[in-house]
Amino acid sequence: MWSLKPLISMSFKNLAVMAAFSLFIFYFILLASLFTMVDASKFLSILKSERFYFSIKISFITAFITTVISVIVAVPAAYALSRTNFRFKPAVDLFLELPLIISPIALGALLLLFFNTGAGKLIQNNFISFVYEVPGIIIAQFVTSAGIATRLIKAAIDEISPRYEFVARTLGASDFKAFSTITLPLAKNGIIAAAVLTFAKSIGEFGATVTLAGAMPMKTETLPIAIYLRLSNADIEGAAVFILTLLALGFTVTLLTRAFAKVRHG
Amino acid sequence: MWSLKPLISMSFKNLAVMAAFSLFIFYFILLASLFTMVDASKFLSILKSERFYFSIKISFITAFITTVISVIVAVPAAYALSRTNFRFKPAVDLFLELPLIISPIALGALLLLFFNTGAGKLIQNNFISFVYEVPGIIIAQFVTSAGIATRLIKAAIDEISPRYEFVARTLGASDFKAFSTITLPLAKNGIIAAAVLTFAKSIGEFGATVTLAGAMPMKTETLPIAIYLRLSNADIEGAAVFILTLLALGFTVTLLTRAFAKVRHG
Amino acid sequence: MVKIENLCMDIGVFSLKNIAFEIAKGACHAVLGPTGSGKTVLLETVIGIQSVKSGRVIIDGRDVSALSPATRDIAYVPQDICLFPHMSVMDNIMYGVRVRKLDTAPLMPMIDELIDFLGIRPILGRHPSGLSGGERQRAAIVRALAAKPRLLILDEPFSAIDSALREDARRLLKELYARHDITSLIVTHDIDEAYFLADQISVLIAGAVVQSGERDDIYNYPKNIAAAEFLGVRNIYDSAVESVQERSLAASFCGGYKINITCGCAQRKFSAGQKIKWAIRSEAVYILKEDSDPAGKSNCFDAEINTIYTRGKMHTVLCAVSGGAVIEIDIHDAAFNKLKLARGKKIKISLNPDSVFIIN
Amino acid sequence: MVKIENLCMDIGVFSLKNIAFEIAKGACHAVLGPTGSGKTVLLETVIGIQSVKSGRVIIDGRDVSALSPATRDIAYVPQDICLFPHMSVMDNIMYGVRVRKLDTAPLMPMIDELIDFLGIRPILGRHPSGLSGGERQRAAIVRALAAKPRLLILDEPFSAIDSALREDARRLLKELYARHDITSLIVTHDIDEAYFLADQISVLIAGAVVQSGERDDIYNYPKNIAAAEFLGVRNIYDSAVESVQERSLAASFCGGYKINITCGCAQRKFSAGQKIKWAIRSEAVYILKEDSDPAGKSNCFDAEINTIYTRGKMHTVLCAVSGGAVIEIDIHDAAFNKLKLARGKKIKISLNPDSVFIIN
C-alpha cells in the first residue's frame, strides 16, 4: 500500500475501472491474435470441407440431445430443490454442485471406469456402446452439464415468490397445475437461458469427451476435438477456423442469454 | 402428457423429488464405480511415488498463483462492474462472460496462437517462456478462471447495499476508504468463496493446460494431465488414484464454500 | 362459520400456541399483532400451506385441517397481492373458475358485479405490471371471490397501497363487506385498520392470542400489559384496590388520590389492598373548561401541562398530576384551540370512570 | 442555513424540476411526497451521490454542489438505517471521527450525551444484527451526529420501526431536535410524521415542489389539487365567486347556498363570477348541538348523515347537505357519543370561514 496509497486515494474508482479494462484487454488481445493467423483462402477451403461440416453437425446434434435431456431432468429436479424439503436434500444438492468444480477429465474418466465395471459392460454389450462412440459424447456432455443446468434453473425458480403457487392452490389448482400454469411460465426465460448455456457448454466440452469418446476424426470429432486434432498436427491455421467458430457461437449465446435475462427482469 | 397425467396429478412433488434423486444416483454410481477399480496396494504405491507428489505439488503451486493473481485483478474489476458506470462497460462485461461459455481448449489454443504472433514471440524470447512450460499452466488456468472469479466477486458485491458506502462517504470516507473499510470486509466471505472456487477450477483445468503447456510427465503434469497420461497408457487403476484425489479436493472445496456462504447469510 | 380450534404449530424456534377463535358467517375477524408475532404463519396454516401440529380448522362444519389448499374453499390475497404477472387481469380473475372447471355462466353475474363495484372493468385486459397498488389489490379481491369461497383471507391488505390512497381502499372494502355476505379473516399490524374493518379482533403476541373479542372491547379494554401497550394505551399506573363497592371500585393513584373504576363487573374479582394496574386511553381523558365546576364530576384532578405534541387533527398533551404521575391526553384540534392550552398552564382533568380499566 | 437552489436532475425517464427551498439553522424541513415522487433522488443529490444537472446546494454559505459526499458535512441516515454490520455499535458511532482523523477528546462529551439521551449505552458493544429497529435507528442517529455535521438527513426515518413503537421514536427525535441545535432535512410519505417533526414542509409531487412553507400553512391550506388530495383533504368543491369583500369573499355552494371564506387576503386576486374550487379539512367541519341556535354562526347548513365510519379516537361522518353535496366530518369519539349521531339523522353543520380555503 505504501507508495500506491496516493494513487489509490486520488481515484480509486478509476483504478478499479482500469482493472476491469486490463482484464478486457487481456481477453481482447487473445482474440485479436487469432486474426493474425487466419488466411482467407485456407479459411474458406476449411469452411467448405466435409470434415468441418461433420464437426459442426456432430457438435450440434450431440449438444442438442444433451440439452434436451438435461432440461427434462433439471426442471423437476430444480423444482424439488427449490420448493420442497425431502430427506437427503443436502446430499443431493452437494452432488449437483460437483460437476461445477471437478475437472471434466475426472468426470470423463469416471464414466470410462464405470463402463469398465460389470454393470457398465452389460450396458455396453446389450444396449448402447458409449466408449469411443457418439453416445459417449452425449453422456460426457450430460455429466458435465446436468448439475449446472439444475443449479441455473433452481436459481430461476428461487426468484419466483412461492406465494404465486400458494394463491393458485387456494384457487383450486393441484400442485402440478400450479407449477405448470404459474411457476413454469414465470421461469420460462430462466429455463431458456439455462438451456442455451447448457447447449454452449456442451458444444465446448472437451475433457470428458476426449476421455470417454476419444479423439477420432470424422467419428467423435466435435469442434473442440477438432481443435485438439489440428493442434496435434501443428495445423495452427486450421485450428484457428474452429476456434473462430466456437468464439462466434460463444458470443451469440452470451448475447442471447442476456436478452432473455433482460426480458425476465423487465 | 397422455398416460403420465394421472401419475403426475397424483404426486407431482414426489415426481420432482424423484428427478432430483435420479440425478443424484447417476453421479453417485459414477463415484461408486471408482472404488471397484482401486487396488489398495497399488493405490498406496502410487500415493508414495515421486510422480504423484510432483503432480500434487505442481497443481497446488500453479493453482495457488493463479488464484492470487485472479483475485487481485478480479476484486477491483468486480467493484468497477458492480458500482460504477464507465464507457464500454457492456463490452467489458460481455468479454468477462466468455470464459464461462467458450471451450477451455479454444482459450488454450488462443493463447498458443498469441505466443506464435510477433508480440508473443517477443515475450517468450525475452521474458518468460509459456509454451510447454510451467508458466503456461498458470496462464492457461488464469485465462479460464479470471472471468469467472470476477463474476463471482461481482455477485458478492452486488449483494451489499451501496447505501453502506453512501453512509461511509457522508461520514468522511474517500471512495477507497469506504471500499476498504466497508464493502471489502462485507464481501470477504464471498471473495474467499470465489478464491476457493477459482483454486478448485484451476486444479481441475485440463483443456487449456494441455493445449498450451502440453502433457509432459514430471514437467507440466498437473493432476488432470496425469489422469490423461495414465488413461493414454491404459493405466486405469493409476488414473483412479488421481481421480479420487480430485474428487476429494472437490468435495472439500464444495463444503468449504458452503460454510463461507452460510456465514455470509447468517 | 369458521372455527379455529387450539391450533398449534412449530417452525424451528417459532411456535403458535393454542390459537382459538371463531368467525361468524358474514363477519370480518382481524388478527392483530406486531411484526414477528406469527400472523403470517397462522394464516398459512389456515390456508393449508403449513400443516398443523395439533388443533383443527373447521369451515361451515367441515374439518379442513387435513385437506389440500385447493379443496378448503378459502381464498387468499397475500400481502404482496401476487397477481399472476403473465396473465391479464381477466385471466387472473377467471383462474380459479377455469382450474376448477366450474360452469362460468352462473358465476358471471356476481363476478361482473364485483368488477363494476371495485371499478376494475377498464383494466381487465391489462397485465399486472402496469397497474397501481390499489388496482392490483382490487383485481386480487375479485380473483379471490370469483369462485365464491367460504372464507376470504387478506394478509396486511393495504400494505401495497400508497398511504394517501389507503383510506379510499379501506372504505371500498368495508362497503364490499356490507353489500356481500363475505366471511373474512384479515391479518394486520395496524390497529386503526383492524378497528375500521373488523367486527371481532384477536390480538396475537409472540405466537399466542392474548385477547379475542368484539372490536370495541379490545380497543377500549385490553386485558393485559402486552396487549395494552401494543394497542397504544399510554396511561398505565401501578395501584392498589382501596375499596370495592357493588358496581365499582376505588383504587389508589399517585399522591394519595383515589380513582373510581366502574368498568364491567370486573370488581367482583378484586379485594381491598390487592395490587392492580389501571389504565385509560389518552383520548378518554378530558380537560375541563376553566370555568367548569368539578364538584359534580368524578375522578377530577389538578394537573400542569408538561409537554405538547401538535399534530394535524389531534394534539397530545402530557400533564403532571399534582401527585407526580404523568397523564397523556389526546385532544381534538378545535378543543385544543378553544382551551388555549400551553406549556406550564394549570388545568383540571377528568377521567370517566367507565373508561378506566384494569389490566393484569 | 441550507439552501437548495433550482436543483434539476435527470435519471432516465425521471426528473427533478427546479427544486428550491431553504432550511433555517436549527430547523427541521420535511420533504413530503408520495412513492415515486423523487424524494430519494433529491436526497441523494443533496448528499452528493447523484450529481446535479443544474442548480446548487449551499450549506452555511458554501456551495457544496461539486464536492464529494465526504466533504459536504452532511450526515445521512438511510431508510434501511445501514449500520455497518461488521462493526460494533460503538465502532459504528466512531467511524466518522476515525476516518476523518478528528481529535476524539473534544467530541466525546457530546457523543456521550447523545448515547445517554438516546439510551443506547447498553448496546454499544453489540453488533447490529441482534438489535431492534428502534435501537438501530438511534445508533445510526448518534453515528450521524458524532462528527457534528451541518445538516442531518433522515430518509423515511421510522419505516424500519414497528408501528407500535413509532410514536416513542418520534417523540425522542423531536426532543433531540429541541435539545440540540440540529439542522435537519427529513424525507417522508407520511403526513402525520412530517407535521409532527418538521417546522417547514415542502410537498414534492412528480419531481416538482408544488408547495413549500410553514407546517401549519401546508397542512391547513394546500394550494393545489394534487397537494390537497395527497394531504388528505376530502372536501373539495367546484364553485364560483359570488361577491368579494375587503377581508372575505362569498362563493357558491350546491343548491344555491353561499359560503363565506376569510382565509388570508387571497380574495384580492378574485373577482365575482370567477370559477374556483374551495375546500375544508374534515376535522374543521363542526356538527352543532341540537339545541344550538345557528343564527349567530356563519356557513351553517342542514344536512343528513349518510354513512358513519367508526374508528378508535376519531370517527368519520359523511353527510349530504340539502343541496346534494356530501361533506365529510371527522369527529372525536367523545363528541360523537354526546351528539348521539346515527345514519339518517338530520344535523346542522358549521364551516368556520377561517378554515375554508381556495385551491387552484
Image (cartoon, coloured by chain):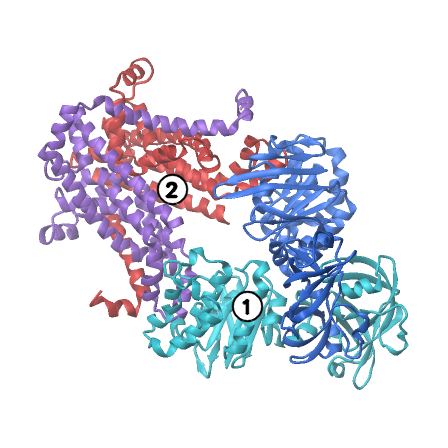
Chain colours: A purple, B red, C cyan, D blue
Could you tell me which chain the residue with mark 1 belongs to?
Answer: C
Is B14 in front, or is B137?
B14
- The x, y position of residue D270, in whole percent, is 70, 54
Which of discs 2 and 1 lies nearer the camera? The answer is 1
Q: Return the residue found at the far bottom.
A: C246
Give the Cα separation between the discs numbered 2 and 1: 45 Å
Q: Position of residue C309 (x, y in %)?
A: 76, 57
Q: Please name the residue that numbered disc 1 is placed on.
A: C187
Tell me, yes or no, if residue A235 can be seen here. no
Dividing the picture into quarters, in which one does residue C47 lie? Answer: bottom left
| SS label for mark 1 | strand
Q: Residues within 10 Å of mark 2 (few under 14, many from 20)?
A: many
Q: Chain of mark 2?
A: B
Q: Write down the quadrant of residue D125 in the picture.
A: top right
Amino acid type of disc 2? Answer: Val
Residue that mark 2 sits on: B253
Q: Amino acid at mark 1?
A: Val
Which residue is drawn at the image coordinates 24% and 44% (left, top)?
A: A199
Residue in the image at 66% along x and 53% along y: D223
Where residue C322 appears, x then y in whole percent?
A: 89, 64
| Side of A240 relative to B134 (left or right) | left
For image coordinates 10% across by 39% down, the residue present is A219
